[in-house]
Amino acid sequence: MTRIRKLEVDDWDPELREMARADSATALEQGLTRMFAHTPEVTKGMMAFAGAMKVHRELPERLIELVRLRVAFHNQCRSCMAIRYEDAIADGVTEDLVCSLEKPMDADDLTEAEKVAIRYGELMATNHLAIDDDLYDELGKHFTEKQMVELGMTVAFFVGFGRLAATWHMVEELPDKFQSENGPMTPWGEDSIRVR
């Protein structure tokens, strides 16, 4: 059960409700905003930041989704692992590709750019001080500095809010696998939910 009370859409700040398109969204699409709605002004700022990262993104949706799911695994954020974003699916993310995230450095269907971005995301989630000059040199072979900044900001968002979401334990609307209390979960090889 979720550890922070979810606010009903009718109880949200009207501007926040409009920003989140909450009236036309499913409960799962409303997601963490149901808890964030306790702090509407801060949430509006966070949504503006997240929206700017999305609208002005240069990096491919496929790459971002793969990094997001690998970070979600390290965060053990069940809602993050269960969700697949439609724009990423349209950009080539399949469940077979998600299964490659079990051992991404050995996967044949991931590009070298995807592998180094995934490695960067993994280290940000597990041992950020291990990110060194060599990893930045490797990133520089595939990405511009602007894209590396974008990747870093995006991964920081995933790590921080994914960890927060994991502690809030919002699992009620997820497939049964993700509601289980039996050990660590994985985003590969099982049920997922498509959201816009």
Image: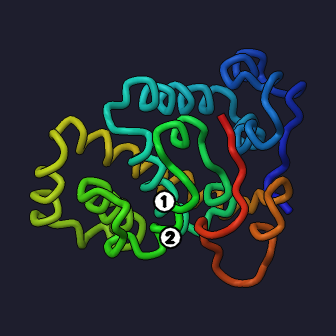
State the image quarter where residue 58 is shown. top left
For the point 25% across and 54% down, the residue is 113
Which label is found at residue 97?
A: 1
Amino acid type at mark 1: Leu
Residue designated by label 2? 74
Q: Secondary structure at mark 2?
A: helix
Frontmost residue, 90 versus 193: 90
Q: Position of residue 96 (x, y in %)?
A: 53, 62
Q: Secondary structure at mark 1?
A: helix
Q: Residues within 10 Å of mark 1 (few under 14, many from 20)?
A: some
In the depicted structure, whether residue 101 falls above or below residue 147: below
For the point 33% across and 75% down, the residue is 106
Can residue 157 be seen here? The reply is yes
In the depicted structure, whether residue 107 falls above or below residue 156: below
Q: Position of residue 136 (x, y in %)?
A: 15, 57
48 vs 167, left or right, is: left
92 vs 19, left or right, is: left
Which label is found at residue 106?
A: none
For marks 1 and 2 on the same chain, the one whose residue lies earlier in the sequence: 2
Q: Position of residue 108 (x, y in %)?
A: 34, 67
Can residue 3 be seen here? The reply is no
For the point 60% across and 32% down, the residue is 42
User: Which quarter shows the C terminus?
Assistant: top right
In the depicted structure, whether residue 103 falls above or below residue 173: below
Frontmost residue, 196 versus 43: 196
Q: Residue furthest bottom?
A: 183
